[in-house]
Each structure stands twice: as C-alpha cells, then as structure tokens.
Image (cartoon, rainbow, N blue to C red):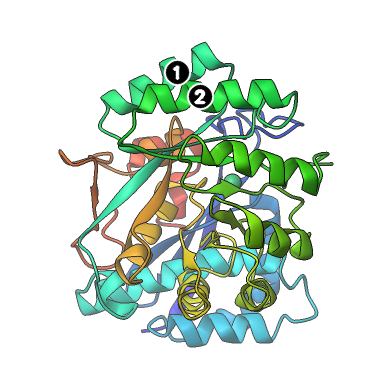
Amino acid sequence: MRIREISCTGLRGGTPEGGWSRELRPEDCVHTLVAVHTHEGLMGVGSAFTNDGLVRAALSVLRPLYEGESALEPERVSEKLHQHTFWMGRGGAITHAISGIDIALWDILGKATGQPVGRLLGGRYRDRVRPYASLLADEPPRLSEHLLALREQGFTAFKIGWGPFGRHSGALDEAIVRGARDAVGEGSLLMVDAGGSDAFWARDRRWAHRTARMLATFDVAWFEEPLRPDDLEGYAELRGRSPVPIAGGEVLTRRQSFAPWLRAGALDVVQPDSTKVGGLSESRRVGWMAEESGARLVPHGWNTAVGLAADLHLASALPDTDLVEYKTGSPYIDDLAAGGWRLDSDGMLAVPEGPGLGLELDREALARYGNERLLAPS
Ligand SMILES: [Mg+2]
C-alpha cells in the first residue's frame, strides 16, 4: 500500500481562547488536520498543532520523500522524514507537520490490519482512560460555576491554568485554588497549570517554590509549567524540593529534546503533544523513556478530536498513562468527532475498539471549520 497524496485543512472559526497573553481569536488557525491518501483508496487522518500555511509549506518540502512510500510503516517513514529534513526546520514546522502524517499513517495501518492503533503501539494496558477536564483559570466565583458544570457532566479530574493564575498576587492564586478544590470536592483529581510557556513569563524560581507549597495544602496532583519552558536547571531544582509533582514539556518536540530533561530528573510528568512532538511514534518512545527514568507521560491534549483519539490509543499502550487531557469547550474536540465523546458512569472514556484510530470525522463540522476536500482532494 503506497502513499498517493497528503492533503490538509486548517481549522478556524471556533478556535477557543488559549489563555495566551496575546489571546487567540476564533478565526486564528493553530490546528491543521492532515489526511494521507493511498493508491488503494484507504485514507488516514492526523492532526498538527500549527497553522495551515506552515503545514502546506512543510508538505511541499516533504513531498519527494513521502510520495510512493509505504503507507503501512509509520515509524520508519516518519523517521525517514525527520532524518532527511534535519537542516530544514527540525523541531519546528516540519516536525509539527510530520506529527500529523505519522498519526494518519498509524490510522491507515490500523484500518489495513483491522486493529485499533493502541494494540499496534505495543498492546493495550487498559480499555478505558480517565479524561481530565482542562479549562482556563478564572476569578473564583466564575471558575467555581464552570467546574461545577463540568462535574455535572461526569468529569472526576480537572486542570485549571493560565488566565489570572500566577499573573497577579499570591492571595488571588490561593483563592483560585481554594475555590477550585471546594467546587470539585475532596475525591476529585485537581491539577494546576501556571502556563510558564506564555510570552515573557515573569515569575521566578522563588515564586514557583512558594506556590508549590501552597498547592500541596489543597492536595493538587501536579503543578504544571511553573517556570519558563527552557529552564531545565530550575525545573530539576524545583522537582527535588517540591511537595507536589512537577509537570511540563508541552512545547518540546522530538524525543531527543526530552532526553536531557529525563536524565536530569527535571519532571514527574512529561507532557508531549502528539500533534506536535512528531506523532504517536515519537510520543510512544518518550513515554517509555519516561517510564525508565522514574517519570510518566500524560499527553498534552489542547488540540483536536483526532489528537484526543490518538491520545486514548497512546494511553492504552503505556502502563503508567491513565489520564488524557480533555480540552473542554472546543468545537474542534466536541464537534469534529461524529457522535461526540461520551463519558461512562465512572467518568471514563473508552479507548476506541474499531480499526485504526476508530474515529469518524463529522462532515458537517469539518465543512464548518475546515474544508471537506481534506477527505477527497482530487
Ligand atoms: Mg499546559
């Protein structure tokens, strides 16, 4: 089975706020769907966390490398694309685009063999995964209302972050976390994300240490991105002394970038984004590297329904990955999956059983936010 063509479509019109200091507008495109088409007619879909203009440019650079290649060897073909573009945007737009191609190739391999992707990634350690509801932090009364509504929907794990948290005062930070803990209850999992990869993040290591101690009093399950994303030494020092686990790595791409972080013991939880790090081939390897370094992988999932399906399969294939991030309030997650996502009575999501990613795109939503020709380009 050979690759005939790769198409893509940017998603715009429903882009949710990201909490960035220069906030996203609904019409901004930061997620692009990718489809790999074969001569035999099978097709796979992937997702790339970047703008469609960059994906289109990357595809034109990559085309001579993928045209006519096997559509049934995702890891080898993705590695070929990485290796031959070493001098061309490595870690950036090229890597983001390869992420989408890689996920689509796993989808094709699953469809061709009649197996769910998670089984092909090595085997299923679990059939269900606990999704944590991910939302932007807000002033306490509004945040509580939002959390209560999500709890009502069946979620049992929550992450608040960005927004005002870490941007004003220690008193407000504490009020936000206290309100959140009260809203979700003692038995729920609660995580806090400072969003240190925001532009010009201004809080220092002292703030991170102080805040980690405050979070421990509210039984917070992890403290995410408390420092600037390149401050490896600061993370290693913080993790050594923090009473709560430290999470990060959502902006890192390529498995090679995670190696020094894991060697330094800088993180308890590594959070590669499969739609950016290099796809499932790459995040699976990061997951096993983490496993052997005393850390664990919980995927960054602020992306699309395709990314969520990929994360469910990834989580099924890693022994310690029992959570996925569920970005709430995004039509790219909720509406793009035909039939939507359903939490069971325990607040869990089933790992799709069908072949490939086991995801069908909702054509109407695809036409609304992207271009239907993704699925039948010529
Ligand atoms: Mg984050």
**Looking at numbered disc 1 in the image, what kind of residue is underneath it?**
Ser
What residue do we see at 51% from left, 47% from top? Answer: 303
The circle drawn on residue 144 is: 1
Q: Position of residue 375 (x, y in %)?
A: 40, 55
Q: Residue at x 65, y 49 (%)?
A: 225
In this view of the protein, which residue sits in the foreground, 68 or 130? 130
Q: Is residue 10 above or below residue 109?
A: above
Lower sequence index among marks 1 and 2: 1
Q: Would residue 360 be seen by someone viewing this image from the given angle?
A: no
Q: Position of residue 85 (x, y in %)?
A: 72, 80
SS class, disc 1? helix
| Residue 270 sits in quarter | bottom right
Which quadrant would the N terminus be assigned to in this image?
bottom left
Amino acid at circle 2: Arg
Does residue 356 sit above or below 309 in this rendering?
Answer: below
Q: Residues under labels 1 and 2: Cα distance?
A: 10 Å
Q: Circle 2 — which element? A: helix
Residue at the disc numbered 2: 178
Q: Residues within 10 Å of mark 2 (few under 14, many from 20)?
A: some
* Observer-nearest of 368 and 245: 245
- Depth check: give the residue in front, 213 or 195: 213
Side (left or right) of 8 relative to 107: right
